[in-house]
Amino acid sequence: MDCASCGARAPASAQSCPECGARLAPEPLSPENTAIREQAQQRVSESEGARHALLQAIPDLIFRFDADGTFLDCVPTPSIPLLAHPDVFLGRRVDDV
């Protein structure tokens, strides 16, 4: 990519010109890259839908924690009621609840 300020050649990954330091504008996506991006977004959407359907099909109550034991997420189920609203424990450590 060429710098609009000084005309120097910069690597495609550069955010600023190596010669003058001017901010480089990103090059527009080509039609091929746009199609690839749209296909990737479609695959991610399908994957998220499949993951959601799988979690909803599991009859157990699911909790997701980080390495420190902090509640990150909860997937409730109608057959097992929660003893507390998720706002009470999400974002808090197991030891604190």
Image (cartoon, rainbow, N blue to C red):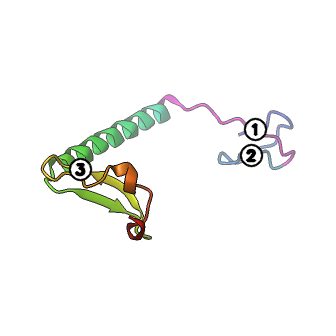
Circle 3 residue: 76
Q: What amino acid type should be assigned to the residue bearing mark 1? A: Asp
How far from the left and from the top, in percent, is residue 79? 12, 50
How far from the left and from the top, in percent, is residue 56? 19, 46
Q: Secondary structure at mark 2?
A: loop
Q: Looking at the image, is mark 3 or mark 1 nearer the viewer?
A: 3
Q: What amino acid type should be assigned to the residue bearing mark 3? A: Pro
Ranked by sequence position, the earlier of labels 2 and 1 is 1
Ranked by sequence position, the earlier of labels 3 and 2 is 2
Relative to the observer, which residue lies in front, 39 or 93? 93
Judged by its main secondary structure, the magenta piece is loop
Instruction: Answer whether residue 21 is magenta in the image.
Output: yes
For mark 1, does the 10 Å Cα neighbourhood hold few (<14), some (14 to 19), or many (20 or more) residues? some
Relative to the observer, which residue lies in front, 26 or 61? 61
Q: Give, as a single range, the part of the protein colored magenta.
A: 19-31
Tag 3–tag 2 contact (CB < 8 Å): no
Tell me the number on the disc at residue 2.
1
How far from the left and from the top, in percent, is residue 42? 34, 36
Image quadrant for the C terminus?
bottom left
**Distance from the alpha carbon under mark 3 to that under mark 2:** 52 Å
Residue drawn at x 33%, y 41% is: 43
Q: Quadrant of residue 49?
A: top left
Relative to the observer, which residue lies in front, 71 or 26? 71
Image quadrant for the N terminus?
top right
Residue drawn at x 66%, y 36% is: 26
Tag 2–tag 1 contact (CB < 8 Å): yes
Q: Considering only vertical position in the picture, is 7 above or below 78? A: above
Residue drawn at x 41%, y 33% is: 38
